[in-house]
Image (cartoon, rainbow, N blue to C red):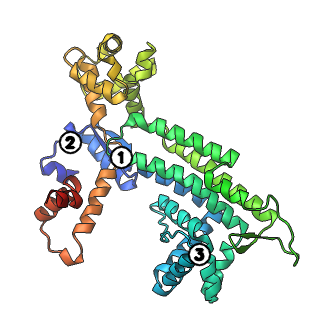
Amino acid sequence: VKLLVEKGLDVSKLAGIATDGASVMVGCRAGVVQQMKALSPSLLSTHCIAHRLALSCGGAADQIPYLVKFQEILNSLYKYFHNSPKNTAKLESIQSILNASSLKMKEVFHTRWLSFEGSVEAVVRNYPSLLSVFLEEKSAKALSLHKPLSCYKFLYCAHFLSDVLKQLCFLCKQFQRSDIDFSSVNSLLNSTVSVLERLRDSKDGTVLSSFLQETPSSPSLDSSGLCTFEFKGHTIRDSSKQRDEAISACEKFVSGVIVNLRDRFVSKGDRHVISAMCSLFDPSLIASSVSPSKETLAILVDFLQTCSFPNYQSLRSEVVGFHEFVRHSGSSTGLSTVKDLAQFGIRHSEVFPVVGFIGRRMLVLPVSTVDCERGFSKQNLIKTDLRNSLKPESLSNLMMISIEGPTCLDTACEL
C-alpha cells in the first residue's frame, strides 16, 4: 500500500476493493484492506462472489468422506488416460466401436472446485467405455479403478452430482459476468438454492431420473447369491447399504452447500452498506410506495458521515422525493433494475445530490475479482518460458489487445 501511495495513487478516491478473502488481503491487523481503510475510511471491501461460491462448494464436499474419495477416483481416472497415449487410444477405439459420444477426461482442482462438473460429466458419458477399457486391460491399476466404478454408490453419486453441479456451474458463470452488479447476486443465489433444495428432496434431476429408470428399484440377489444388476452392458455391485450411503452423502452435500452459501453471502460488515445502497434503488420498493427502513437509512447516514459528505442529514427527505419523482416520471417505465435507477439518480444529482453520490459509489463498487483473474491468465498465456524476455510495456500492450481487442476470427474476417 505504501508503494502505491509513493507511486501517486490517491487511495482516498477509491470507492471499493474486491479480494479473494486471503488473510494477507483481509487480515484484521496488517491486511491490505485494513491498511487502505486507514488512509480512506470510506473504502468498502467485498469478498469476490466467485471465490465465495467455490469455497462454499469445496467446504461442503470436504465434510463428506466419500466425496473426498470420489474426487480421488476422478483424478486417478484423469491420470490413467492423460499420462498414457496407449490408454487414451484404447478408450477412443472402444468408443468408436460402441458408437458412443466421447468427452475428454478432466482433472479436479481443489482450488477451482467447480472444475468437478466437467470431470463428472465426462465419467457419466464415457462410463460404459471406461469399464470396457479396464476389463480389457486387466492390469492391477486398471482393476483397481474398475472396482470402485462398478458399484451402485459411485453411479448414484455421479448422476446426482451431474444434476447439482450443472446448477452450481450456471451460477458460477453468472457470477463471472463482467456486467453483473450487487442487485443481481441475491436473486441468482436464491433461485439456485431453491433448485438445489428441490433436487435434494425430490431427486427429480434429469440425469439422475434417467439413471434410476434404468436400474432396479431395490437390490435383488442373482443366481450366484450376490446383489448385482446390469447397467449399460456391465455388471454393477449393489446393496441396501450402498444405496442408503449414496443417498445420505448426496443429501448432506447439498445441505452443506446451501448452509455455506447462506453463511458466506449474508450481509455483514461492509456488505451491510452495499445492501442498503441496493435497497435505496430497489424498483419493487419504489413501485409499491414502500420507503426504505429506518435501519437502511441509518446505515447510509453513517456511511455518508464516514465519507465526510455534506448535508447527509437530508438523506431521508431526499430519498422520499427521489422515489416520488421516479414514480411520476414519464421515463419510469424504462427503469426496471437497480442499475437503471442508480444511473437515473446520477443524471438528476443536481436535484438529489445525496442520492446521486450514493448511486455513483454503488455502480463503481467491484463485485468480484474475475477480471483481475482473467488478466493473470492472459499474462501466463503470453509470457511463456520461450518469451520470458518480454518488456513490461510490450507485455502490457499484448495483454490489452488480448483482453479488449478483437478476436483473431474477427480480424481474419476483416482481412
Per the rendering, the mark at residue 177 is: 1
Can you identify the residue that label 2 sits on? 11
- Name the residue type under label 2: Val
- Mark 3 and mark 2: Cα distance apart in space: 63 Å
The mark closer to the camera, 1 or 3, is 3
Q: Residue furthest bottom?
A: 139
* Residue 169 or residue 216, whichever sits in front: 216
Q: Is residue 145 visible?
A: no
Q: Secondary structure at mark 1?
A: loop
Q: Which mark is residue 149?
A: none
Q: Which is nearer the eye, 25 or 125?
A: 125
Residue at image point 60% right, 82% down: 133
Is residue 401 found left or right of 114 in the rendered image?
left
Crowding near the residue tagged with mark 2, few <14, some 14–19, many ≥20 C-alpha atoms within 10 Å: some
Instruction: Tell me the SS state at disc 2.
Output: helix
Q: Nearer the viewer, residue 164 or 96?
A: 96
Amino acid type of the residue that numbered disc 1 sits on in the rendered structure:
Arg
Callout 3: SS? helix
Q: Nearer the viewer, mark 1 or mark 2?
A: 1
Q: Which mark is residue 98?
A: 3
Viewer-nearest of discs 3 and 2? 3
Q: Earlier in the sequence, mark 1 or mark 2?
A: 2
